[in-house]
Amino acid sequence: MGRLFGTDGVRGVANADLTAELALGLSVAAAHVLAEAGTFEGHRPVAVVGRDPRASGEFLEAAVVAGLASAGVDVLRVGVLPTPAVAYLTGELGADLGVMLSASHNAMPDNGVKFFARGGHKLADELEDKIEAVYEEHRTGAPWDRPTGAGVGRVKSYDEGFEQYVAHLLGVLPNRLDGLKVVLDEAHGAAAGVSPEAFKRAGAEVVTIGADPDGLNINDGCGSTHLDLLKAAVVEHGADFGIAHDGDADRCLAVDHTGAEVDGDQILAVLALAMREHGQLREDTVVATVMSNLGFKLAMEREGLFLVQTAVGDRYVLEEMKENGYALGGEQSGHVIVLDHATTGDGTLTGLLLAARVAETGRTLADLAAVMERLPQVLVNVPDVDKSQVHTSAELTAAVADAERELGSTGRVLLRPSGTEPLVRVMVEAADIDQARSVAGRLADVVKSTLG
């Protein structure tokens, strides 16, 4: 797997790359690293452990729980809940550590392990590096210092987490959703229970699709990476709009009443204006990544808002927000962080806030989202290449420079290695979609021939 930690925890094919032994070892290593950092000082440590519905999550959860308990950490098993719910409960319960087992939007055979620090924030890069180093040291034979007797961790189920998280979501809403009809696509994932419950309690009429997880169907032709079913359902049911989550529900994409997609940039734009109106958008600033559509940047400038851009990955958006006290940030893919109410992207919260804005204004989602015009943007994924050479290949650098000269000031090019998959992403924006496709296709060919 190379370096174990990517941009969003440790991921791989469950029981091949991500084995029970690896999950157990990482959990023990995390406990030891946090203990050495003083996180557990003066009290008995507690961890919150949750998962999405993947079948492999059952044995991986058992491994993680065993590893933590063997290292002297008491474990609260919250079961199948969204990633942001595990983050929230980690903070709300005063736990020292949170662990989420999920591969997010990836296909069912994959799974992942994601750690949260006290307060529900993602671990810093240096702590992940330390966990990986300690894991490798002990994997090769160095014995662990293990507690015995009463020092071992105790394990119990914590069923109150569902209700606590739903109550938290409803407490954030600025107004009710009465009169709205919403279709929710739960991706057969972790939000299949909490998301419909929250929308219904808020007053919306709810139609659900993709809400019957069986451990094998997560993200299978549904959810935020496959919007066709949601588009059709919104039109069929005459709904005001639709909301789509991914497998662990840290993402939210939307579909307006006509069946047109509303992406993360547009959602950010709508929420930014709503938060400014209510005096909640600190410094009149939104944080987004370099993948944001140029149309989003132009819209924010036109509305008198400031845009700060970071590297791709919601962890980097969050770091920028925390460092400078900003209230709103996110990614085009639908990770939206409202820092006053969540420590990570929260798809259900985002969907509820979007719905609240529709209800508050009486405007359609299509009308609200029209605050920005998406410039044509083409994204090509090039698999099975050496992604480590993206920024060092002279031939690739020259090809990008040629493309940028061709596009001029009306477009841009971005090449980046995926943080979670073995591929390179080629993104091209242009005023004309045919030009964007042509340039992206040529660059993808160069990536494949140069790095393949």
Image (cartoon, rainbow, N blue to C red):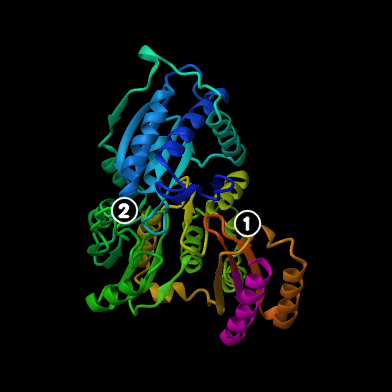
Crowd class of label 1 (few under 14; some 14 to 19; many from 20; radius 10 Å): few
Seen as rendered, the residue at the extreme front is 141
- Write down the quadrant of residue 434 in the picture: bottom right
Residue placed at 59% from the left, 86% from the top?
432
Q: CA distance from mark 1 to mark 2?
A: 28 Å
Crowd class of label 2 (few under 14; some 14 to 19; many from 20; radius 10 Å): many
Which amino acid type is shown beneath numbered disc 1?
Ala
Q: Seen in the image, is 374 located left or right of residue 387?
A: left
Q: Main secondary structure of the magenta part?
A: helix
Residue 303 lies within the magenta run: no
Where disc 1 sits, the SS reads loop
Residue 77 locus on image (x, y percent): 31, 35
Residue 235 locus on image (x, y percent): 28, 78
* Residue closest to the eye, 267 or 140: 140
Residue 151 locus on image (x, y percent): 40, 15
Report the residue marked by disc 1.
Answer: 311
Taking 449 as reference, is 165 above or below it?
above
* Callout 1 touching callout 2 (CB < 8 Å): no
Where disc 2 sits, the SS reads loop
* Residue closest to the eye, 307 or 384: 384
For residue 191, which numbered disc appears in the image? 2
Q: Seen in the image, is 275 located left or right of residue 235?
A: right
Q: Which residues are magenta?
A: 426-452
Which amino acid type is shown beneath numbered disc 2?
Ala
Residue 258 locus on image (x, y percent): 34, 80
Q: Earlier in the sequence, mark 1 or mark 2?
A: 2
**Can the viewer see residue 21 in this picture?**
yes
Taking 67 as reference, is 228 above or below it?
below
Residue placed at 56% from the left, 80% from the top?
376
